[in-house]
Amino acid sequence: MNQNIAHELSSEVTDSFKNRLLGNGKSRNTVKMYSYIAEQFLEFIGYDRERINLESIEKFKEYLAIEKGYSKSSIYLYVRALQSFVNYLEVNDIGRLKAPKRPQKVPNYLVGEEVRAILKSCSDIRERLIVELLVYTGIRVSELCSLRINDIDLNGRTIRIRSGKGDKDRIVVFSEEMLQTLDHTYQ
């Protein structure tokens, strides 16, 4: 198959897949990741629809684990995305596609000394505010990046998080200490 024709076919398929995911209410981050994974898989199989089968997916998983050194959690994500992609393509001869079990990890938390050391190393009020928001409110980096000034209510000591994980909005409360830093930043 001509590589240019194959790539055009791939772009059409992944664009259509993106639209289906968006239409089904998937978050932007999920759509971006799933379409990226679908594109990688199509490239791995040479954009040949006939090669979309359980064997090629298993070989792709092996490639990710052995050649790329991906973790079980990453491979799990890839398998979930490929399950969705194969379902979208209505390929019925896949059989039972298994994702590896993900290890249950206990999250690592910063202790007080570590937080103080990080805050002390901040060179300006903006850096300090970023660190404080992440540490003291528990918001995600992606949520912080999309934060707008009008999302912060100083009087109510709340922050409105728009389109967080699962594309859900939520309200986060912050402490009196955070209020002082925010107040200083606004002035």
Image (cartoon, grey):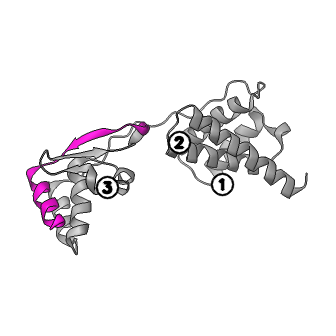
Between residue 166 and residue 111, name the one nearer to us: 166
Between 48 and 63, the residue placed more toward the observer is 48
Q: Extreme bottom residue here?
A: 123
Q: Give the Cα distance between marks 3 and 1.
A: 41 Å
Which label sits on residue 148? 3
Q: Which residue is mark 1?
A: 67
Q: Nearer the viewer, residue 136 or 53?
A: 136
Which residue: 80% across, 47% down? Answer: 9
* Mark sitting earlier along the chain (2/3): 2
What amino acid does circle 1 point to?
Answer: Glu
Which amino acid does the dot numbered 2 rest on? Answer: Thr
Q: Nearer the viewer, mark 1 or mark 2?
A: 2
Quadrant assignment, res 23:
top right
Q: Position of residue 134 (x, y in %)?
A: 27, 54
Q: Which of the two marks, 3 or 1, is nearer to us in this view?
A: 3
Q: Tell me where residue 127 appears, x and y as whole percent.
A: 25, 68
Q: Which residue is mark 2?
A: 30
Structural distance between the alpha carbons of marks 2 and 3: 22 Å
